[in-house]
Amino acid sequence: MTQHFRDEGAAARGLNPMEAQAASDASRSIHSIHALFTEAPTAIAVFRGPDWVIDFTNRLAQRLFRDRTVVGRRLFQCAPELAGSQVAELIERAHGSGRAAAACELLILLDRGDGALAEGYFNVTLEPIPAAGGGTESVVLFAIEVTDQVLARRRIEQLAEQLEHERHKLEQIIQQMPHAVYIAEAPSGELVMGNAQGAAQLGRPFVASTGIAAYSAGYQGFHADGRPYAPHEWPLARAVASGELVRAEPVEMQRTDGSRAIIEYSAAPIRDAAGQIVAGVVVGVDATERIRALREEQRRSEQLRGLAEASLAVNSAPSLDRMLAEITERARSLIGAHQSVISMTRDQNWAQAINAVSLSDKYAAYRGYDAKTNGSGIYTLACQQNRPLRMTQAELEAHPAWRGFSGEAPRHPPMRGWLAAPLVARDGSNIGLIQLSDKVEGEFTGDDESILMQLAQLASVAIENARLREEALAAEKRFRSMVEATTVVVWRTGPDGHVVEDSASWRDFTGQRYEEWLGYGWLDAVHPDDRAHANAAWRGAVASRSRYEVEYRLRRRDGSWAHTVARGVPLLADDGSIQEWVGCNVDVSDIRRAEEALRVQHQIVRTIAENATLGLFMMDAHQRCSFMNPAAEKITGFTFDEIKALDRPLHEIIHHRRPDGSHYPVEECPIDRALPRKSQEQGEDVFVHKDGSFYQVAFTASPILDGGAPVGTVIEVRDITEQKRAEAERERLIAALERSNKELDQFAYVASHDLKAPLRGIANLTQWIEEDLAGTVEGESREHMSLLRGRVRRMEALIDGILDYSRAGRMRHEVETVDVGQVLADVVELIAPAPGASVEVAPGLPALRTERIPLQQVFMNLIGNALKHARRADVRVRVGHRDAGPHHEFFVEDNGPGIAPEFHDRVWGLFQTLEARDKVEGTGIGLSVVKKIVESRGGQIWIDSSPGQGATFRFTWQKRDPNDR
């Protein structure tokens, strides 16, 4: 029951109005708090004192104890079942310690009203209320019942345990199933279960995935057309995502060993009671053997049908090349391989040419490959034995006849297994080989070998027939071409040799009418000088019944004479008698003229060779000398007959030893390399003279090619012994000249120093005299002193000029990239033109690879001269250039007085000036130095000038110094 409070009124308590109002407000607050606790959503009770007298219970606490609690009574009187319980322990602990006590999911057995105790679970908190004098006055109980939550959790745990048990049973069932089984959750598609049969099918353990998007990362599957399965295409993904029911869908699965298994997957969604998809299951049946057997059966049927179609296609091919291409393509498609090749042999020569190739897109990069084999190895073995060969790649590489690809390895398409069938002619000889490699599925089988042999037999017959047909057509074509190209005259006679039948070709060639050449009338068209010989030869052949061949001149229709070769053979009947004679006259006039021209040309060439100063040799394919001209005999000391009699390679006779006496192997000889390399070789070497001495030669060895095949070598040899001596002497003289120049430079420097020393003494002496006689030297004496110092300065400048001139053109500096514009800017800055004077430099001046200092010296002299000799304060100098091919042409132009044409050559001479030195100070050496520098650098310099028109000095300078490396 709830405790009740009474308010007996303020007046009864003797309170004044203000106190009464406060008491009334407090009473209302107490009633509000009481109502709050009473209606609180938590069971609240207050126990007072150590006997736990109930002071207060709210509505939830009353329902908890089924209204058995009475304010003012003890707790255990109202709820005796709590005695000795954990609740009592908590109340006792809070009351005794004065601290809060709590417990979660506390089990309390309560009497719910029927006398039986029921379990209840509570989250309990006990808060002590301290007494005014110390200790604990009361304990407040806060209790939240969580019985339903605890029981629900226990139920969930029980269900989870049952679910785990059922899952374990499901796993056991799945593991015992004979096929692969996978289960995925919906809607994520996460793979959660797979059995050992699935792992065995793919050769890998079960791989869980986080969702459908990861299916293709864990597993690789392919459609029948080779396309890989996208994540959403997997049967299980479709069942989980859309509820599709998939039945026996074949998927080519990639095993870990690289092979493929064909698995038929059936997938279905798993739905809950409401019809929602909660999971998906897929079952995989290994159908590899069954499907491959079915495919193999279909392939055999297709092969048989293909053989029939191939027979029709091959026999209807318009040419041998088209037939070979058809056979190659049919062989690859019938057996299912990526590579197919037909190679034909010629006269049992197995260095085969590749006549036809068929490659799938896998080997598209090799479709232009057509190299010949070298006639050895396993290809030859198949042709020699004339039987099929079938090998895996490992067996092929282990076979003793396998030679690999030799030098063709970088270009040859790779192989994977090999199946070969010979092409056999009617006489049993080998005419070629069909080869297959890299089967699309698995290795080549005995059935494949049988199919290829049938195709090879079909191809052999068709190839022989085609060759015979082509040879017949070619023979006919050759005969017609020969008749047309060589003006062949065809004729027939009776058994006795008399002409009885007309011949249009004879009439067209000779102009004789039929009646004119009947019998032996044809002799009238033969040249009179040849007639008796032609008649005797023909009658002799008729009498002896033997082949007839004779050459004579035959008159043409225009009256000229043609050299002809007449040939005739008798055609015999079955009884051996002659039925008729058939023959022809071939016009060989052009051949005879060509032979005569060749004879003349040969004689000219021989005359040139025999009179040439170069030694000429010819070697055959075996390196033996087949020709020597007289110059070669003179150089070597051997005659051609002596060389020929030795019958040894030329190298062993004139090139077999080095100057140190060591052997010179022919393999290292550049001359003998020209033939096998089919390339010209040039160089210098040392030959051995007949007398054993050594001499130096320059040689050029050129291969002689016949249709691309090397058949000999032409060797040009020049004895350079004297040349080498002259070169050595030249080098010696150059070195001596360099020493002389160096000594000259040293002498010039010393002479300059020694000559300048007294001049400096004279200059100093004049200065001292002036200082000592200061105030006494006047007028003419002072002028003489000044003139003396000027002469000294001129002598010093003259000595410097001579020194510069001696060095000009000989001193070399480092080649570098020189910006001409920058050089001119530096020159102008160094010269520092006087006020009023100007130097204009044109823009866009080039950059050169040259020596900077000589170019700067040229511009310094030319610009300085222009400023010095202008004779005007407003002198203007302009510098520019133009492109002149391998050179740049520069000019320095001024507005000075100009130079008359008669002095244009004089200005370049040493010590030449156009004005007295007393008027314009100068040595007359500057332009000489400029000219020497320019010409030593491969350039030219000249003047364009007229009096009163200013002067333009032009010079050329190479764009790139020849010494620049």
Image (tube, rainbow, N blue to C red):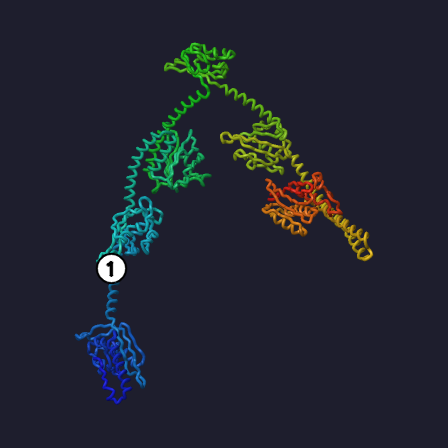
Residue 638 visible from this viewpoint: no
Mark 1: which secondary structure? helix
The answer to whether residue 488 is left or right of residue 152 is: right
Residue 898 against residue 473 in the figure, above or below:
below
Instruction: Please identify the quarter of the rendering in which residue 61 is found.
Output: bottom left
State which quarter of the image contains the N terminus: bottom left
Instruction: Report crowding for label 1: few under 14, some 14 to 19, many 20 or more residues within 10 A (C-alpha).
Output: few
Camera-side residue of 471 and 509? 509
State which quarter of the image contains the C terminus: top right
Indicate the position of residue 759 as horizontal and vertical percent values: 77, 50
Q: Residue furthest right?
A: 776
Camera-side residue of 65 and 56? 56
Residue 266 visible from this viewpoint: yes
- The tally of labels here is 1
Indicate the position of residue 441 as horizontal and vertical percent values: 34, 42
Indicate the position of residue 582 as horizontal and vertical percent values: 42, 16
Q: Residue at x 62, y 45 (%)?
A: 880
Residue that label 1 marks = 166
Q: Residue furthest left?
A: 114
Residue 803 against residue 480 in the figure, above or below:
below
Q: Residue at x 28, y 44 (%)?
A: 291
The amino acid type of the residue labelled 1 equals Glu
The answer to whether residue 441 is left or right of residue 377 is: left
Indicate the position of residue 833 as horizontal and vertical percent values: 67, 51
Instruction: Please identify the quarter of the rendering in which residue 336 is found.
Output: top left
The answer to whether residue 283 is left or right of residue 407 is: left
